[in-house]
Amino acid sequence: MIEKDIKEVFFSKEELHSIVERLGKQISEDYKDKNLLLVSVLKGSVIFMADLMREITVPCEIDFMCVSSYGSGTKSTGNVKIIKDLDINLEGKDLLLVEDILDSGKTLSYICKMLKTRNPRSIRICTLLDKPERREVDLYANYAGTFVPDEFVVGYGLDYDEKYRNLPYIGVLKPEIYSNDEE
Ligand code: IMP
Ligand code: MG
């Protein structure tokens, strides 16, 4: 069982549901007469994306992009590698980037710059979790589910070394789990 590795639950299944519901309502209001394209940044945002899109009541399209910036550790390297690009032409679309967590901001800042060159009508950011005190670049989320303290969290799509994504809640791991990870 993966539950045994969790030290503390930060956001329960129910709390996450109400956060996502609130974001969905707000986005539905704001994108009434727009050309909404939700872009999920894989893999961490996959569960958030799946739940969020079902709370959105205006027409929308979805697409996925996969980048890697972390390797297997817990700190951003700043080296963003595109593993899977978008399929949809962005011209005239109102892009909403759906992220699991905004940490240093390096990953999204890189993605935003790159996607802007493809002439979308607008680009905004929706992140489930925000760690503002960790920001290293000038970037903010237009929609943020909730703030988290400066701790490495897992679950609801977020991983540590590709594991724990399937936890239905968000929590922190016991310190001994990271003990082999040189920082
Ligand atoms: P940034 O470039 O530092 O903003 O990193 C953003 C990405 O790093 C996120 O999309 C996550 O995949 C990963 N990340 C940052 N903080 C955490 C965390 O606390 N838990 C799991 N993944 C994280
Ligand atoms: Mg990750």
Image: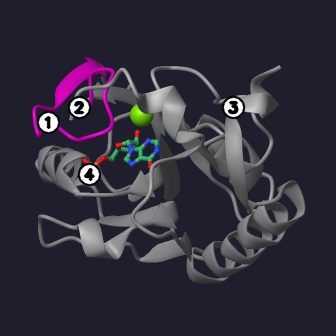
Q: Is mark 4 within 8 Å of ligand 1?
A: yes
Q: Position of residue 57 (x, y in %)?
A: 78, 65
Q: Mark 3 or mark 1, which is nearer the start of the sequence?
A: 3
Q: Amino acid at mark 2?
A: Ser
| Extent of the magenta region | 70-83
Q: CA distance from mark 4 to mark 1?
A: 13 Å
The residue that appears at 33% across and 37% down in the rendered structure is 74
Name the mark nearer the viewer: 4 or 1. 1
Q: Quadrant of residue 70?
A: top left
Direction from residue 37 to residue 73 in the image, left or right: left
CB atoms of marks 2 and 4 within 8 Å: no
Which residue does the numbered mark 3 point to in the structure image? Answer: 5
Name the mark nearer the viewer: 2 or 4. 2
Q: Main secondary structure of the magenta part?
A: loop
Q: Amino acid at mark 3?
A: Asp
Which residue does the numbered mark 1 point to in the structure image? Answer: 77
Mark 1, secondary structure of its residue: loop
Q: Amino acid at mark 1?
A: Thr
Q: Quadrant of the C terminus?
A: top left
Q: Mark 3 or mark 4, which is nearer the start of the sequence?
A: 3
CB atoms of marks 4 and 3 within 8 Å: no
Which residue does the numbered mark 2 point to in the structure image? Answer: 69
Q: Mark 1 or mark 4, which is nearer the start of the sequence?
A: 1
Name the mark nearer the viewer: 1 or 3. 3
Q: Is mark 2 within 8 Å of ligand 1?
A: yes
- Does the magenta run of residues contain 80? yes
The residue that appears at 73% across and 65% down in the rendered structure is 20
Image: 53 above or below 64: below
Q: CA distance from mark 1 to mark 2?
A: 6 Å
